[in-house]
């Protein structure tokens, strides 16, 4: 076998011109393949770990209170954060995505900007910290100055936006915006830093400490906006993480346990909300009986009208009504302890009707039943303490007909798989006018699938380049071997006449083609790395071009994969060997006498 290899190597170097030309073709092909694949992977890395991560994170948990698209608030962040932190492996950062569109006024100039909060106290891994530093380079000032308490709303602004607004370090910017409560606000920001961004879409962003943004927007310390998660190996894990979080965020019931007062009478009661969609109303009608408020006499076959279930509907159980001596039209009040701030909340309601529950578990209990809109107005304004810690709370069994129509802590939307599905889901959310907080868990594949299509396009281009390369190699190898065999026909006859076996003749040509492809591939890979190094050394300045997002620090970004290079090289070698096999077998099967008679 070693002798056959030596003969193959000798023959390879004998016919230098033809082999060099074919080797150059293979080397150029593998060079283009490596560069294209590395560039595609580089773009993919930028899209996944910079563009998608900065815009919406690899995974996002979004909150929309009462189904309003721009009311992105969740009232109990400590209810959600531990679930994420304990159950997401490879979590690199967890950010409160708090931002607001504003009108900024500088020195004689005004423009639209987005105020975004960043948390400098959050611990992130060194690699992610380095990526942030490379993407947001400070020209003047220091990012850490955002935490200064003696400066009024310290802000960092991009170089381009600073030039447009005609502001410099230590200047002030006036901004107008609408806060979380729908109120128009105006405030002053102090420029403590000017930065340069790689991403053109970040030029209109003003960075403040997240605590300052929350204060400006009217968030309380325990409230948050949407949550953005950055994870390791997002391309592989983002969807799985989103699916897992979705399964863990199933809401429980929203319950208020309160002291109820009417005149000088007191009682404890469980306050529940009921869903107001048509199906839930229909179910509710089957679960309760209306009572005449004055005499508490059961009306047999009574039918509740649609208006009885309107937004102002307040029902109490017959048992509680008797204890308080309350009747329809009376005003009573409830008081309960808040979950946060150590305070209490008191709310007054006007009684609509007195009801009796068909559910045996609730038949003789103190229950207040509210339409979900009225219930959530109370529930979200001041969250009650956890009802699970109170033993006197009364609830229907989970398998009862009443349980599914009760108001929950939040409304969890189904998972979507594309941006189109997500957009349709958001439109439906607006149409349905949910009364509770709507929670949606999405990965970057849904929130930024249009951006990620760029990667698919690049992969398609690379695939087409591979197919063209393989076709060129196939034709080149076949033609070269045919010419070689034709020119060495008499030589084949000679070696066969002196005793070389058919297999050895066949293998000598296969080895020759194999070594040619191997040497050419190695040369092509080396040239590819040299060219990538040279190309990435050039600085490309196009600050106003959207394509600048595909650059890293103004340079082309290549991300070669050694596994991919090895697999592509092996694939080319296999193709060459398979292609060479058939003409080599034909040459080996040639009769020695026929081969010796060949003349050209």
Image: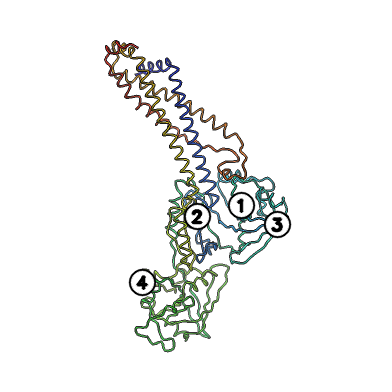
Q: Which residue is mark 3?
A: 151
**What color scheme is it?**
rainbow
Q: Which residue is mark 4?
A: 401
- In the image, residue 39 sits, relative to residue 495, either above or below, namely below
How many numbered dots are placed on residues in this image?
Answer: 4
Q: Nearer the viewer, mark 3 or mark 2?
A: 2
Q: Position of residue 437 (x, y in %)?
A: 49, 65
Q: Position of residue 131 (x, y in %)?
A: 57, 44
Q: Which residue is mark 1?
A: 120
Q: Nearer the viewer, mark 1 or mark 4?
A: 4
**Label 2: element kind:** strand
**Label 3: element kind:** loop
From mark 2 to mark 1, how far is it between C-alphas?
20 Å
Q: In the picture provided, is 420 more to the left or to the right than 190?
A: left
Q: Position of residue 597 (x, y in %)?
A: 29, 10
Q: Position of residue 41 (x, y in %)?
A: 49, 39
Q: Mark 4 and 2 residues: CB-CB less than 8 Å, in contact?
A: no
From mark 3 to mark 2, how far is it between C-alphas?
32 Å
Q: Which residue is more in the foreground, 392 or 589?
A: 589
Mark positioned earlier in the residue sequence (1 or 4): 1
Mark positioned earlier in the residue sequence (4 or 2): 2
Q: Quadrant of the C terminus?
A: top left
The single residue placed furthest to the bottom in the displayed view is 295
- In the image, residue 69 sits, relative to residue 446, either above or below, namely below
Mark positioned earlier in the residue sequence (2 or 1): 2
Q: For mark 4, does the 10 Å Cα neighbourhood hold few (<14), some (14 to 19), or many (20 or more) residues?
A: some
Instruction: Identify the residue at image location x=52%, y=74%.
Output: 336
Instruction: Identify the residue at image location x=36%, y=76%.
Output: 286
Q: Which residue is mark 2?
A: 60
From mark 4 to mark 2, how far is it between C-alphas?
34 Å
**Label 4: element kind:** loop
Q: For mark 2, does the 10 Å Cα neighbourhood hold few (<14), some (14 to 19), or many (20 or more) residues?
A: many
């Amino acid at each position: 076998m070693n002798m056959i290899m030596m003969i193959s190597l000798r023959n390879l170097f004998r016919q230098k011109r033809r082999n060099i030309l074919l080797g150059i073709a293979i080397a150029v092909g593998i060079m283009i393949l490596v560069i294209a694949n590395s560039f595609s992977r580089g773009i993919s890395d930028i899209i996944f770990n910079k563009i998608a991560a900065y815009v919406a994170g690899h995974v996002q948990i979004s909150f929309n209170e009462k189904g309003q698209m721009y009311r992105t608030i969740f009232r109990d962040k400590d209810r959600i954060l531990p679930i994420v932190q304990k159950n997401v492996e490879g979590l690199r950062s967890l950010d409160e995505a708090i931002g607001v569109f504003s009108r900024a006024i500088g020195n004689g100039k005004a423009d639209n900007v987005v105020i975004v909060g960043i948390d400098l106290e959050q611990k992130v891994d060194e690699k992610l910290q380095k990526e942030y530093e490379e993407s947001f380079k400070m020209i003047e000032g220091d990012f850490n100055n955002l935490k200064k308490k003696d400066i009024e709303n310290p802000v960092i602004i991009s170089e381009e936006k600073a030039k447009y607004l005609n502001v410099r370090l230590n200047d002030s910017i006036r901004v107008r915006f609408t806060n979380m409560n729908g109120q128009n606000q105006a405030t002053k920001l102090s420029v403590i830093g000017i930065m340069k961004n790689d991403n053109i879409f970040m030029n209109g962003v003003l960075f403040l400490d997240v605590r300052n943004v929350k204060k400006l927007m009217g968030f309380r310390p325990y409230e948050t906006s949407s949550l953005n998660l950055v994870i390791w190996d997002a391309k592989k894990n983002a969807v799985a993480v989103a699916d897992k979080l979705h399964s863990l965020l199933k809401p429980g019931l929203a319950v208020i346990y309160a002291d109820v007062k009417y005149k000088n009478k007191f009682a404890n009661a469980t306050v529940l909300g009921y869903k107001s969609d048509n199906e839930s109303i229909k179910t509710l009608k089957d679960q309760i009986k209306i009572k005449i408020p004055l005499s508490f006499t059961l009306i047999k076959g009574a039918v509740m009208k649609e208006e009885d279930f309107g937004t102002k509907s307040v029902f109490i159980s017959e048992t509680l009504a008797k204890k308080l001596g309350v009747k329809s039209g009376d005003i009573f009040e409830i008081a309960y302890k808040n979950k946060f701030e150590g305070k209490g909340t008191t709310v007054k309601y006007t009684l609509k009707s007195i009801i009796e529950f068909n559910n045996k578990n609730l038949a003789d209990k103190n229950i207040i039943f509210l339409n979900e809109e009225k219930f959530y107005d109370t529930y979200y304004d001041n969250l009650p303490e956890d009802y699970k810690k109170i033993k006197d709370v009364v609830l229907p069994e989970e398998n009862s007909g009443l349980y599914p129509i009760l108001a929950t802590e939040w409304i969890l939307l189904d998972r979507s798989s594309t941006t189109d599905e997500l957009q349709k889901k958001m439109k439906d959310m607006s149409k349905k006018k949910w009364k509770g907080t709507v929670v949606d868990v999405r990965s970057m594949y849904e929130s930024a699938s249009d951006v990620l299509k760029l990667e698919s396009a690049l992969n398609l281009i690379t695939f087409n380049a591979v197919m063209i390369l393989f076709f060129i190699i196939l034709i080149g190898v076949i033609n070269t071997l045919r010419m070689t065999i034709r020119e060495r026909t008499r030589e084949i006859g000679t070696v066969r006449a002196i005793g070389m076996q058919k297999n050895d003749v066949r293998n000598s040509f296969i080895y020759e083609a194999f070594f040619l492809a191997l040497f050419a591939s190695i040369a092509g890979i080396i040239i590819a790395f040299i060219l990538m190094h040279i190309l990435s050394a050039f600085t490309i300045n196009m600050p106003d071009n959207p394509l600048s997002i595909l650059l890293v620090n103004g340079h082309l970004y290549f991300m070669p994969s050694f596994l991919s290079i090895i697999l592509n090289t092996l694939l080319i070698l296999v193709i060459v060997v398979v292609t060479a096999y058939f003409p080599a077998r034909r040459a080996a099967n040639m009769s020695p006498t026929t081969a010796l008679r060949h003349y050209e």
